[in-house]
Image: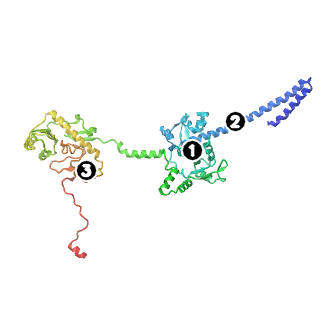
Amino acid sequence: MSAPAVEPVTENKAGEENKMEDVQPTGEPAAQEVAAPASAKASEESAAAPSTAAAAAAAESDEDKEALLRATRQVEFYFADSNLPFDKFMWTLHTANAEHWVPIKTVASFKRMREHQARGLDWVVRALRLSAELEVDAAGEHVRRRTEVQPPKGQFERSVYAKGFGKEEPGLQTRLEDFFGKYGKTNAVRMRRVDGTKEFKGSVFVEFADFKSVEAFLNADPKPTWDGQELLVMSKEAYCDMKIKEKGLSGKAADLRKQNIAGSGRKGFNAFKEMAEKDKGDKKDKGKDKPKPEVYLEFLGSRIRVHEEDGGSVKPEDVPFVKGASLRFEGAGEDVSFDEIKGTLKERFTRAPFVKYKKGDNWGLVGFDKALSDEDVAYVKENLKTLSGKDVSWSVPDEEQERAFQIERATSAAKRALSFSQNRDSRSGGRGGGRGGRGGRGGRGGRGRGGRGGGRHGGERSEKKGEGDKPAGAAGEEQAGEKRKRAVEPDGGPNVGVRGQGVPVIQSSKKPKTDGDAAAAS
């Protein structure tokens, strides 16, 4: 019942009270008459109470709905394509979990969500369950996107510029979002600030969710106003063109300016750029991640595994001991020539022997690829009676010395085998690095692999370049009586380019003129 209906009852009550003052003896009946109107008033007030409470509840419900919607939109912005991949902290949260679940408790603590903290975490969960873009887990503890993150498209074209919002005041961000929300759904409303001081410029860039909303804002009639003042509005592209014209920029300078304003050249974190660089690095390192092939060495009839330690090594227990595959000489001069030994022995032995000799010593060791027969030993003694002009004696070393010598031989061969394996697919470049060029691989006197004095071990005094032990599947060794050949990549053909041959002459395709041709030409 409405308030005016109560007024006659009040007047009635006043009249009865006046009556009581005039007629005192008859107070009881008068009291009964007054009681009746008072009861009616109480009844009417109780009837009005539910109506007022319902109105208050309805108002509170509308306010709560608005707050729920505001909270939902704010969290949707945190996870949106326009923000998530460019917000390093949010991206870290997003990628911390394999299924991209983010703790709601963390999101609720963000600055823009603090206005809802008093309502409690359950209220925030309730707000997030209203979202069509986000999903909440069964426990109500985590939230994530429903779709995969995509590079935002058309951001620049869907963005507008607006100026005329005055100075920053508390709650301005919310007011701005509500203001632009009247024209359509927004992905972001960014208040523009002065670099360094962070002072609000009074202008914003707004990214709408669709072009229809952009058109609605730019073509609004009447023009958009803020606190009674008309705003300066234009598309973001028009704003870029205006600034470029103002500064008199052109060419690359103009393009760079536009990129900076448009956001395509934005500074700071960019998840898409980070992922692209990571993919590029992964592809570059893909070959490095592949397990390295095992390298083996064929030595004295056995196949030995080569290890990478010390640039190529073998386990002593893997090296077979072949008794009688070595000879020791004594009494030599101070400078024994390897060629003097190898050149003499090549007539009998298929592979050139391994020679160990230190300049200044009068003794050395010679290793062969098999156990020597009595005839072999006799041949050596007969044909190498002197070294460096001095008489030498030959003998079979004792077992301990021969075993150590064979391990040393195997280690030396292992280093060459590993070096060959590691470089077989590489291509030398730069000065002196071309294949076949001077100083290149196989070239004369260069730093490349295989040149005279080149290679990693070619200059060592301990004779290794004539070693008869070859790596499995690697470079072959010289055969006796052959010219030294260089080992090249498989795509160049094995063992090509005989050293010592003349440089091939490339014939001109142009025929030389003969006398007859000259006569015809004249």
Residue at 22% of width from left, 60% of height from top? 505
Q: Which residue is mark 1?
A: 199
Front of the two marks 2 and 3: 3
Residue type of the residue flagged with mark 1: Glu
In terms of secondary structure, where does tag 3 sit? loop
The label on residue 216 is none
Q: Judge whether residue 126 can be spotted in this image.
A: no
Color encoding of the figure: rainbow
Q: Which residue is mark 3?
A: 441
The answer to which quarter of the image holds residue 32 is top right
Residue at 15% of width from left, 46% of height from top? 350
- Circles 3 and 1, Cβ within 8 Å, touching? The answer is no
Q: Which residue is mark 2?
A: 57
- Circles 2 and 3, Cβ within 8 Å, touching? The answer is no
The residue nearer to you, when weighing 406 against 192, is: 192
Q: Residue 9: percent from the left, percent from the top? A: 85, 33
Q: Residue 166: percent from the left, percent from the top? A: 62, 46
Residue type of the residue flagged with mark 2: Ala
